[in-house]
Image (cartoon, rainbow, N blue to C red):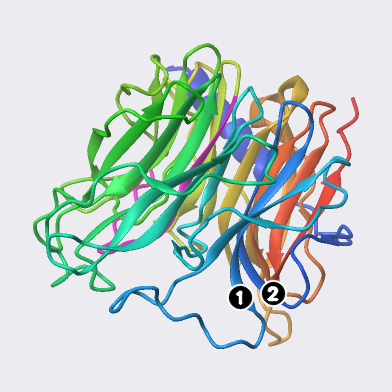
Protein backbone atom coordinates (compact mmCIF):
# COMPACT_ATOMS: atom_id res chain seq x y z
CA UNK A 1 0.00 0.00 0.00
CA UNK A 2 1.36 3.42 -0.98
CA UNK A 3 2.10 5.67 2.00
CA UNK A 4 1.06 9.33 1.89
CA UNK A 5 3.86 11.82 1.33
CA UNK A 6 5.15 14.07 4.09
CA UNK A 7 3.72 17.05 2.19
CA UNK A 8 0.29 15.41 2.14
CA UNK A 9 0.45 14.62 5.85
CA UNK A 10 1.58 18.19 6.54
CA UNK A 11 -1.33 19.56 4.51
CA UNK A 12 -3.86 17.29 6.22
CA UNK A 13 -2.61 18.35 9.64
CA UNK A 14 -2.95 22.04 8.76
CA UNK A 15 -6.45 21.50 7.36
CA UNK A 16 -7.54 19.66 10.50
CA UNK A 17 -6.08 22.34 12.76
CA UNK A 18 -7.73 25.17 10.89
CA UNK A 19 -11.08 23.40 10.85
CA UNK A 20 -11.18 23.15 14.66
CA UNK A 21 -12.92 26.47 15.19
CA UNK A 22 -14.32 27.67 18.48
CA UNK A 23 -17.03 30.38 18.32
CA UNK A 24 -15.49 33.86 18.64
CA UNK A 25 -15.37 35.51 22.03
CA UNK A 26 -15.23 39.13 23.10
CA UNK A 27 -13.49 41.59 20.80
CA UNK A 28 -10.17 43.04 21.88
CA UNK A 29 -10.30 46.72 22.85
CA UNK A 30 -8.90 48.94 20.12
CA UNK A 31 -7.33 52.40 20.23
CA UNK A 32 -7.90 55.06 17.53
CA UNK A 33 -4.82 55.74 15.41
CA UNK A 34 -6.04 58.16 12.72
CA UNK A 35 -7.46 61.56 13.76
CA UNK A 36 -11.15 61.97 14.40
CA UNK A 37 -13.02 63.73 11.61
CA UNK A 38 -10.71 62.46 8.84
CA UNK A 39 -11.53 59.68 6.39
CA UNK A 40 -8.82 57.02 6.52
CA UNK A 41 -8.19 53.71 4.73
CA UNK A 42 -5.50 51.25 3.66
CA UNK A 43 -3.33 50.91 6.79
CA UNK A 44 0.14 49.40 6.96
CA UNK A 45 2.22 48.91 10.12
CA UNK A 46 5.97 48.27 10.49
CA UNK A 47 8.42 48.11 13.40
CA UNK A 48 11.84 49.76 13.05
CA UNK A 49 15.06 48.18 14.35
CA UNK A 50 15.00 50.57 17.34
CA UNK A 51 11.47 49.42 18.28
CA UNK A 52 9.61 52.47 16.99
CA UNK A 53 6.29 51.48 15.45
CA UNK A 54 5.17 53.28 12.30
CA UNK A 55 1.64 53.37 10.95
CA UNK A 56 0.95 54.37 7.36
CA UNK A 57 -2.48 54.99 5.86
CA UNK A 58 -4.33 56.89 3.15
CA UNK A 59 -5.93 60.16 4.24
CA UNK A 60 -9.00 60.87 2.11
CA UNK A 61 -9.79 64.27 3.54
CA UNK A 62 -12.12 65.73 6.14
CA UNK A 63 -15.30 63.84 6.86
CA UNK A 64 -18.23 65.49 5.09
CA UNK A 65 -16.03 67.61 2.81
CA UNK A 66 -16.52 67.48 -0.97
CA UNK A 67 -14.13 65.07 -2.69
CA UNK A 68 -10.89 66.65 -3.86
CA UNK A 69 -10.65 67.74 -7.46
CA UNK A 70 -8.12 65.94 -9.65
CA UNK A 71 -4.84 67.85 -9.88
CA UNK A 72 -4.91 67.48 -13.66
CA UNK A 73 -7.89 67.55 -16.08
CA UNK A 74 -9.23 64.16 -16.97
CA UNK A 75 -7.70 62.25 -14.09
CA UNK A 76 -9.43 59.66 -11.97
CA UNK A 77 -11.02 61.16 -8.84
CA UNK A 78 -8.84 59.12 -6.45
CA UNK A 79 -6.60 61.93 -5.29
CA UNK A 80 -5.54 61.41 -1.73
CA UNK A 81 -2.54 61.69 0.58
CA UNK A 82 -0.41 59.08 2.31
CA UNK A 83 0.45 59.84 5.93
CA UNK A 84 2.71 58.28 8.55
CA UNK A 85 2.43 58.36 12.35
CA UNK A 86 4.96 57.04 14.85
CA UNK A 87 4.63 55.29 18.20
CA UNK A 88 7.38 55.21 20.81
CA UNK A 89 5.43 53.08 23.29
CA UNK A 90 5.24 49.87 21.29
CA UNK A 91 2.07 50.72 19.36
CA UNK A 92 -0.10 51.64 22.33
CA UNK A 93 -0.44 55.25 21.13
CA UNK A 94 0.56 57.15 17.99
CA UNK A 95 1.55 60.75 17.40
CA UNK A 96 0.13 63.16 14.85
CA UNK A 97 0.41 61.96 11.25
CA UNK A 98 2.85 63.55 8.78
CA UNK A 99 2.02 63.74 5.09
CA UNK A 100 4.58 61.75 3.10
CA UNK A 101 3.71 63.01 -0.40
CA UNK A 102 4.78 66.62 -0.90
CA UNK A 103 2.31 67.27 -3.72
CA UNK A 104 -1.08 67.34 -2.02
CA UNK A 105 -3.63 64.99 -3.51
CA UNK A 106 -1.26 63.23 -5.88
CA UNK A 107 -1.85 59.74 -4.45
CA UNK A 108 -4.01 57.20 -6.29
CA UNK A 109 -4.98 54.51 -3.80
CA UNK A 110 -7.71 52.07 -2.87
CA UNK A 111 -7.88 49.31 -0.22
CA UNK A 112 -6.82 46.82 -2.90
CA UNK A 113 -4.06 49.11 -4.24
CA UNK A 114 -2.56 50.67 -1.10
CA UNK A 115 0.77 52.41 -0.51
CA UNK A 116 3.35 50.26 1.25
CA UNK A 117 6.06 50.97 3.84
CA UNK A 118 9.45 49.33 4.42
CA UNK A 119 12.15 50.14 6.99
CA UNK A 120 15.83 49.43 6.38
CA UNK A 121 18.43 48.39 8.94
CA UNK A 122 19.46 52.04 9.27
CA UNK A 123 15.93 52.99 10.27
CA UNK A 124 15.18 54.78 6.99
CA UNK A 125 11.49 54.75 6.05
CA UNK A 126 10.76 53.83 2.43
CA UNK A 127 7.32 54.29 0.85
CA UNK A 128 5.99 53.06 -2.48
CA UNK A 129 2.80 54.73 -3.69
CA UNK A 130 0.97 55.24 -6.96
CA UNK A 131 0.72 58.77 -8.29
CA UNK A 132 -1.64 60.37 -10.75
CA UNK A 133 0.05 61.78 -13.82
CA UNK A 134 -0.31 62.71 -17.46
CA UNK A 135 1.45 61.00 -20.35
CA UNK A 136 3.86 63.33 -22.16
CA UNK A 137 3.17 61.31 -25.31
CA UNK A 138 -0.61 61.81 -25.49
CA UNK A 139 -1.61 64.01 -22.54
CA UNK A 140 -3.85 61.28 -21.14
CA UNK A 141 -3.96 60.17 -17.48
CA UNK A 142 -1.47 57.56 -16.29
CA UNK A 143 -0.67 55.84 -13.00
CA UNK A 144 2.98 56.19 -12.01
CA UNK A 145 5.11 54.29 -9.43
CA UNK A 146 6.46 56.86 -6.96
CA UNK A 147 8.92 56.62 -4.09
CA UNK A 148 9.69 58.75 -1.05
CA UNK A 149 11.84 58.19 2.02
CA UNK A 150 12.46 59.64 5.47
CA UNK A 151 15.83 59.60 7.20
CA UNK A 152 14.63 61.38 10.35
CA UNK A 153 12.11 58.94 11.77
CA UNK A 154 9.10 60.02 9.73
CA UNK A 155 9.31 63.71 10.64
CA UNK A 156 9.92 64.74 7.01
CA UNK A 157 9.98 63.07 3.60
CA UNK A 158 11.77 63.65 0.32
CA UNK A 159 9.80 64.73 -2.77
CA UNK A 160 8.17 61.77 -4.49
CA UNK A 161 10.16 60.59 -7.48
CA UNK A 162 9.16 58.18 -10.25
CA UNK A 163 10.76 54.76 -10.30
CA UNK A 164 10.21 54.35 -14.03
CA UNK A 165 9.48 56.58 -17.04
CA UNK A 166 5.93 56.83 -18.35
CA UNK A 167 5.52 54.35 -21.21
CA UNK A 168 4.44 56.02 -24.48
CA UNK A 169 1.52 53.66 -25.20
CA UNK A 170 -2.18 54.50 -25.12
CA UNK A 171 -4.39 51.82 -23.61
CA UNK A 172 -7.22 54.19 -22.69
CA UNK A 173 -9.63 52.59 -25.16
CA UNK A 174 -9.93 49.46 -23.01
CA UNK A 175 -8.23 50.10 -19.65
CA UNK A 176 -10.60 50.65 -16.75
CA UNK A 177 -10.59 54.32 -15.76
CA UNK A 178 -9.38 55.47 -19.17
CA UNK A 179 -5.69 55.38 -18.32
CA UNK A 180 -3.13 55.41 -21.09
CA UNK A 181 -0.72 53.35 -18.95
CA UNK A 182 -0.69 51.97 -15.39
CA UNK A 183 2.28 51.11 -13.18
CA UNK A 184 0.72 50.28 -9.86
CA UNK A 185 -0.41 47.51 -7.44
CA UNK A 186 3.12 47.50 -6.08
CA UNK A 187 5.08 47.05 -2.88
CA UNK A 188 8.44 47.86 -1.37
CA UNK A 189 10.80 45.82 0.79
CA UNK A 190 14.11 46.53 2.53
CA UNK A 191 16.83 44.05 3.41
CA UNK A 192 20.06 45.51 4.73
CA UNK A 193 20.57 48.75 2.81
CA UNK A 194 19.02 47.28 -0.31
CA UNK A 195 15.57 48.64 -1.10
CA UNK A 196 13.40 47.06 -3.76
CA UNK A 197 10.14 48.22 -5.28
CA UNK A 198 7.99 45.86 -7.34
CA UNK A 199 4.86 46.73 -9.31
CA UNK A 200 2.58 45.59 -12.11
CA UNK A 201 3.22 47.32 -15.42
CA UNK A 202 1.00 47.58 -18.50
CA UNK A 203 3.61 48.80 -20.99
CA UNK A 204 3.56 45.51 -22.93
CA UNK A 205 -0.23 45.14 -23.06
CA UNK A 206 -1.84 45.44 -26.49
CA UNK A 207 -5.48 44.46 -25.86
CA UNK A 208 -7.84 44.03 -22.93
CA UNK A 209 -7.04 40.29 -22.93
CA UNK A 210 -3.35 40.85 -22.23
CA UNK A 211 -1.94 40.54 -18.74
CA UNK A 212 0.40 42.75 -16.80
CA UNK A 213 4.12 42.28 -16.34
CA UNK A 214 6.01 42.44 -13.08
CA UNK A 215 8.70 45.12 -12.96
CA UNK A 216 11.21 46.03 -10.28
CA UNK A 217 13.62 48.83 -9.38
CA UNK A 218 16.42 48.28 -6.86
CA UNK A 219 18.45 50.64 -4.68
CA UNK A 220 21.68 49.51 -3.02
CA UNK A 221 22.28 52.78 -1.14
CA UNK A 222 19.26 52.90 1.20
CA UNK A 223 17.04 54.64 -1.33
CA UNK A 224 19.36 57.48 -2.34
CA UNK A 225 19.22 56.21 -5.93
CA UNK A 226 17.57 53.43 -7.90
CA UNK A 227 18.84 51.42 -10.86
CA UNK A 228 16.87 51.39 -14.10
CA UNK A 229 13.75 49.29 -13.80
CA UNK A 230 13.68 45.77 -15.25
CA UNK A 231 11.07 43.13 -16.06
CA UNK A 232 10.76 40.05 -13.83
CA UNK A 233 7.72 38.08 -15.03
CA UNK A 234 4.95 38.36 -17.57
CA UNK A 235 1.45 36.83 -17.29
CA UNK A 236 0.76 38.52 -13.95
CA UNK A 237 -2.77 39.40 -12.88
CA UNK A 238 -2.81 43.14 -13.68
CA UNK A 239 -4.77 44.19 -10.60
CA UNK A 240 -3.64 41.86 -7.78
CA UNK A 241 -1.25 43.55 -5.35
CA UNK A 242 2.34 42.32 -5.29
CA UNK A 243 3.78 41.44 -1.87
CA UNK A 244 7.34 40.63 -0.76
CA UNK A 245 9.18 39.51 2.36
CA UNK A 246 12.94 39.20 2.95
CA UNK A 247 14.36 35.89 4.12
CA UNK A 248 17.71 34.73 5.53
CA UNK A 249 20.86 35.99 3.85
CA UNK A 250 20.14 37.36 0.41
CA UNK A 251 16.82 35.62 -0.16
CA UNK A 252 13.58 37.38 -0.99
CA UNK A 253 10.11 35.86 -1.35
CA UNK A 254 7.43 37.39 -3.53
CA UNK A 255 3.70 36.71 -3.65
CA UNK A 256 1.81 37.28 -6.89
CA UNK A 257 -1.10 35.91 -8.89
CA UNK A 258 -0.14 34.24 -12.16
CA UNK A 259 -2.54 34.09 -15.11
CA UNK A 260 -2.50 30.94 -17.22
CA UNK A 261 -3.41 30.68 -20.89
CA UNK A 262 -6.68 28.95 -19.95
CA UNK A 263 -7.78 31.70 -17.57
CA UNK A 264 -6.72 30.47 -14.13
CA UNK A 265 -5.47 33.11 -11.69
CA UNK A 266 -3.28 31.13 -9.34
CA UNK A 267 -1.64 32.40 -6.17
CA UNK A 268 2.10 31.83 -6.36
CA UNK A 269 5.26 32.39 -4.34
CA UNK A 270 8.65 32.91 -5.99
CA UNK A 271 12.09 32.89 -4.39
CA UNK A 272 15.11 35.03 -5.17
CA UNK A 273 18.61 34.07 -4.01
CA UNK A 274 20.32 37.25 -5.19
CA UNK A 275 18.48 39.93 -3.29
CA UNK A 276 15.56 40.25 -5.70
CA UNK A 277 17.52 40.76 -8.92
CA UNK A 278 16.24 37.50 -10.35
CA UNK A 279 13.56 35.04 -9.23
CA UNK A 280 13.11 31.34 -9.65
CA UNK A 281 9.93 29.66 -10.86
CA UNK A 282 6.61 30.72 -9.39
CA UNK A 283 5.35 27.95 -7.11
CA UNK A 284 1.59 27.56 -7.35
CA UNK A 285 -0.29 27.34 -4.05
CA UNK A 286 -2.98 24.69 -3.85
CA UNK A 287 -4.48 22.29 -6.36
CA UNK A 288 -7.92 23.90 -6.27
CA UNK A 289 -7.48 26.36 -9.12
CA UNK A 290 -9.57 29.50 -9.55
CA UNK A 291 -10.71 30.23 -13.08
CA UNK A 292 -12.10 33.74 -13.42
CA UNK A 293 -12.58 36.01 -16.42
CA UNK A 294 -11.67 39.25 -14.76
CA UNK A 295 -9.53 40.91 -12.11
CA UNK A 296 -10.14 39.53 -8.61
CA UNK A 297 -8.11 42.29 -6.86
CA UNK A 298 -6.67 39.75 -4.39
CA UNK A 299 -3.04 39.70 -3.18
CA UNK A 300 -0.99 36.70 -2.07
CA UNK A 301 0.70 37.57 1.23
CA UNK A 302 3.95 36.01 2.46
CA UNK A 303 5.80 35.79 5.80
CA UNK A 304 9.22 34.23 6.39
CA UNK A 305 10.89 32.66 9.43
CA UNK A 306 14.20 31.09 8.49
CA UNK A 307 13.48 28.10 6.21
CA UNK A 308 9.77 28.37 6.97
CA UNK A 309 7.66 30.36 4.50
CA UNK A 310 3.97 31.03 5.04
CA UNK A 311 1.47 32.23 2.46
CA UNK A 312 -2.21 33.16 2.43
CA UNK A 313 -4.61 34.43 -0.20
CA UNK A 314 -8.24 34.48 -1.24
CA UNK A 315 -9.44 31.59 -3.39
CA UNK A 316 -12.86 31.65 -5.04
CA UNK A 317 -12.68 28.27 -6.75
CA UNK A 318 -15.36 26.78 -4.50
CA UNK A 319 -18.07 28.07 -2.17
CA UNK A 320 -17.69 29.72 0.11
CA UNK A 321 -14.78 31.66 -1.30
CA UNK A 322 -12.30 32.67 1.33
CA UNK A 323 -8.81 32.86 2.74
CA UNK A 324 -6.57 29.84 2.29
CA UNK A 325 -3.28 29.14 4.06
CA UNK A 326 -0.21 27.15 2.99
CA UNK A 327 3.23 26.58 4.52
CA UNK A 328 6.66 25.57 3.31
CA UNK A 329 9.33 23.94 5.42
CA UNK A 330 11.96 23.93 2.67
CA UNK A 331 12.48 27.66 2.07
CA UNK A 332 9.71 28.03 -0.47
CA UNK A 333 10.63 25.21 -2.81
CA UNK A 334 7.32 23.44 -2.12
CA UNK A 335 4.16 24.20 -0.16
CA UNK A 336 1.49 22.27 1.66
CA UNK A 337 -1.98 22.05 0.18
CA UNK A 338 -4.17 25.11 0.71
CA UNK A 339 -6.29 24.89 3.88
CA UNK A 340 -9.38 26.95 4.65
CA UNK A 341 -8.75 29.50 7.38
CA UNK A 342 -12.35 30.24 8.37
CA UNK A 343 -14.67 27.62 6.82
CA UNK A 344 -17.63 28.70 8.93
CA UNK A 345 -17.54 32.23 7.55
CA UNK A 346 -19.89 33.29 4.78
CA UNK A 347 -16.88 35.08 3.29
CA UNK A 348 -13.30 35.78 4.39
CA UNK A 349 -10.77 37.99 2.65
CA UNK A 350 -7.78 40.41 2.91
CA UNK A 351 -5.32 38.20 4.86
CA UNK A 352 -2.29 39.54 6.73
CA UNK A 353 0.56 37.33 7.96
CA UNK A 354 3.50 37.77 10.32
CA UNK A 355 6.04 35.31 11.69
CA UNK A 356 6.55 35.16 15.46
CA UNK A 357 9.30 33.71 17.68
CA UNK A 358 9.51 29.96 18.40
CA UNK A 359 7.90 28.85 15.15
CA UNK A 360 4.64 30.69 15.71
CA UNK A 361 2.75 32.89 13.27
CA UNK A 362 -0.21 35.24 13.30
CA UNK A 363 -2.87 35.40 10.60
CA UNK A 364 -5.53 38.12 10.41
CA UNK A 365 -8.33 38.67 7.90
CA UNK A 366 -11.76 40.22 7.61
CA UNK A 367 -14.89 38.15 7.18
CA UNK A 368 -18.59 37.84 7.68
CA UNK A 369 -20.30 35.09 9.62
CA UNK A 370 -23.58 33.63 8.30
CA UNK A 371 -26.51 35.95 9.01
CA UNK A 372 -28.34 35.14 12.22
CA UNK A 373 -32.16 35.19 12.15
CA UNK A 374 -32.14 37.25 8.98
CA UNK A 375 -29.98 39.99 10.46
CA UNK A 376 -26.98 40.95 8.31
CA UNK A 377 -23.58 40.13 9.76
CA UNK A 378 -21.09 43.03 9.86
CA UNK A 379 -17.64 42.59 8.38
CA UNK A 380 -15.31 41.76 11.27
CA UNK A 381 -11.53 41.52 11.63
CA UNK A 382 -10.40 38.15 13.00
CA UNK A 383 -7.08 36.76 14.25
CA UNK A 384 -5.57 33.33 14.80
CA UNK A 385 -2.22 32.34 16.27
CA UNK A 386 -0.58 29.28 14.79
CA UNK A 387 2.32 27.17 16.00
CA UNK A 388 4.35 24.19 14.83
CA UNK A 389 4.63 25.64 11.30
CA UNK A 390 0.88 26.15 11.13
CA UNK A 391 -0.02 22.60 12.12
CA UNK A 392 -1.74 23.82 15.29
CA UNK A 393 -3.97 26.87 15.69
CA UNK A 394 -5.65 28.58 18.60
CA UNK A 395 -9.24 29.79 18.62
CA UNK A 396 -10.44 32.45 16.22
CA UNK A 397 -10.51 35.82 17.99
CA UNK A 398 -12.38 38.87 16.72
CA UNK A 399 -10.33 42.06 16.95
CA UNK A 400 -12.78 44.69 15.74
CA UNK A 401 -15.61 46.20 17.76
CA UNK A 402 -18.82 44.14 17.71
CA UNK A 403 -21.39 45.51 15.28
CA UNK A 404 -18.95 47.79 13.46
CA UNK A 405 -17.90 47.45 9.84
CA UNK A 406 -14.19 46.67 9.84
CA UNK A 407 -11.59 45.32 7.45
CA UNK A 408 -8.15 45.29 5.85
CA UNK A 409 -5.96 44.29 8.82
CA UNK A 410 -2.19 44.67 8.91
CA UNK A 411 0.22 43.07 11.39
CA UNK A 412 3.75 43.64 12.65
CA UNK A 413 5.72 41.97 15.42
CA UNK A 414 8.04 43.48 18.01
CA UNK A 415 11.23 41.92 19.36
CA UNK A 416 9.43 40.67 22.47
CA UNK A 417 6.98 38.70 20.31
CA UNK A 418 4.02 41.03 20.82
CA UNK A 419 1.87 41.86 17.79
CA UNK A 420 0.78 45.30 16.66
CA UNK A 421 -2.46 45.05 14.66
CA UNK A 422 -4.14 47.88 12.75
CA UNK A 423 -7.32 47.85 10.67
CA UNK A 424 -10.05 50.06 9.29
CA UNK A 425 -13.06 50.44 11.58
CA UNK A 426 -15.78 52.65 10.15
CA UNK A 427 -13.83 55.52 8.59
CA UNK A 428 -10.86 55.47 10.99
CA UNK A 429 -7.70 53.45 11.50
CA UNK A 430 -7.64 51.71 14.88
CA UNK A 431 -5.21 49.30 16.47
CA UNK A 432 -4.31 47.09 19.38
CA UNK A 433 -1.25 45.37 20.84
CA UNK A 434 -1.47 41.63 21.43
CA UNK A 435 0.88 40.37 24.20
CA UNK A 436 3.52 37.73 23.44
CA UNK A 437 2.24 34.18 23.32
CA UNK A 438 3.17 32.06 26.34
CA UNK A 439 4.91 28.72 26.23
> What kind of element bears circle 2?
strand
Magenta stretch holds residue 174: no
| Image location of residue 110, percent across then percent down | 48, 65
Q: Is residue 380 above or below residue 152?
A: below
Q: Are marks 1 and 2 in contact (CB under 8 Å)?
A: yes
Magenta stretch holds residue 288: yes
- The quadrant in which residue 124 appears is top right
Residue 363 visible to an observer of this rendering: no
- Estimate how packed mark 2 is, as few (under 14), some (14 to 19) or many (20 or more) residues with alpha carbons within 10 Å: some
Q: Is residue 179 left or right of residue 144?
A: left
Whole-Å distance between the Cαs marked 1 and 2? 6 Å
Q: Which residue range is magenta in the image? A: 286-304
The residue shown at (53%, 47%) is: 116
| Image location of residue 324, percent across then percent down | 53, 47
Identify which residue, 111 or 66, lies in the foreground: 66
Q: Is residue 49 above or below residue 204?
A: above
Identify which residue, 175 or 89, lies in the foreground: 89
Residue 82 visible to an observer of this rendering: yes
- The quadrant in which residue 408 appears is bottom right
Label drawn at residue 38: 2
- Estimate how packed mark 1 is, as few (under 14), some (14 to 19) or many (20 or more) residues with alpha carbons within 10 Å: some
Q: Is residue 270 above or below residue 135?
A: above
| Image location of residue 123, percent across then percent down | 66, 29
Which residue position is annotated with label 1?
Answer: 61
The residue shown at (31%, 21%) is: 278
Q: Is residue 228 left or right of residue 339?
A: left
In the picture, the quarter occupied by the C terminus is top right
> What kind of element bears circle 1?
strand
Which residue is situated farthest in the top direction here? 249
Q: Is residue 137 left or right of residue 291?
A: left
Task: Provide the major secondary structure of the magenta segment.
Answer: loop
Q: Is residue 259 left or right of residue 39?
A: left
Amino acid sequence: MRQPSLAALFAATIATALAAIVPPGTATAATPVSPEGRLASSPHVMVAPDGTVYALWVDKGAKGAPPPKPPEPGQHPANYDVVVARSTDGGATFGAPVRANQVAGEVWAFPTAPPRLAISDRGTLHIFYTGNGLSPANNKPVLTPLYTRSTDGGRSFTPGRPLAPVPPGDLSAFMHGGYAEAQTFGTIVAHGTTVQALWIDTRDMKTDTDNGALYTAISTDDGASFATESAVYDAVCPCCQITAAPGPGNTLFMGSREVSADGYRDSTVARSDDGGRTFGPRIRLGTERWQINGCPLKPTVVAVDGPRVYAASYNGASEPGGVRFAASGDAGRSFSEFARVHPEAAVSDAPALVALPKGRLALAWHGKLPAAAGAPSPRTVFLRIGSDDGRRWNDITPLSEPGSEAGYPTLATRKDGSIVALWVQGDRIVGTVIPPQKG
